[in-house]
Amino acid sequence: MDTMEFKLRGEHVALCDLLKLTGIAGSGGQGKLMIANGEVTVDGRPESRKTAKIRANQTVQCLGQTVRVVAD
């Protein structure tokens, strides 16, 4: 499983934007579809809110890739 770090530039990032910014999804729309299809977990739990606020120290998993969100 690939793990990458994402440096947060503010207080939070929307989940669909995070998927787009990390390259897991090709677009925000594709990211929203992945979330709607149940392909995304946050801290090990399924997440269905497309614009869930992802904050520092959270971990997002999708399609075998892991993103650790860290404070900038």
Image (cartoon, rainbow, N blue to C red):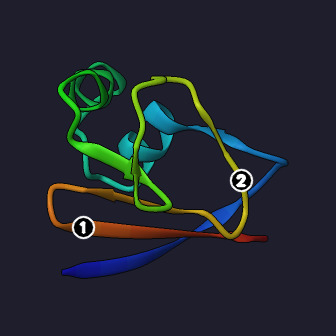
The residue lying at 18 percent from left, 26 percent from top is 37
The residue lying at 48 percent from left, 45 percent from top is 18
Q: Is residue 15 above or below residue 11?
A: above
- Under mark 2, the amino acid is Arg
Q: How many marks?
A: 2
The residue lying at 39 percent from left, 56 percent from top is 22
Q: Residue furthest right?
A: 11
Considering the image in quadrants, where does the N terminus appear?
bottom left
**Disc 1 secondary structure class:** strand
Mark closest to the chain's N terminus, 1 or 2? 2
Answer with left or right where residue 57 lies relative to residue 31.
Answer: right
Where residue 63 appears, x then y in whole percent?
Answer: 15, 56
Cα–Cα gap, marks 1 and 2: 18 Å
Answer with left or right where residue 55 lies relative to residue 16.
Answer: right
Q: Is residue 23 above or below residue 65?
A: above
Residue 35, numbered label: none
Where residue 2 appears, x then y in whole percent?
Answer: 24, 80
Query: What residue did someone put label 1 on?
Result: 65
Where residue 28 appears, x then y in whole percent?
Answer: 36, 25
Where residue 69 appears, x then y in whole percent?
Answer: 60, 66
Q: Quadrant of residue 7?
A: bottom right
Query: What residue did someone put label 2 on?
Result: 55
**Disc 2 secondary structure class:** loop
Answer with left or right where residue 2 lies relative to residue 12.
Answer: left
Q: Is residue 1 above or below residue 60?
A: below
Viewer-side residue, 4 vs 43: 43
Considering the image in quadrants, where does the C terminus appear?
bottom right
Viewer-side residue, 64 vs 44: 44
Answer with left or right where residue 20 lies relative to residue 12.
Answer: left
The residue lying at 38 percent from left, 44 percent from top is 19
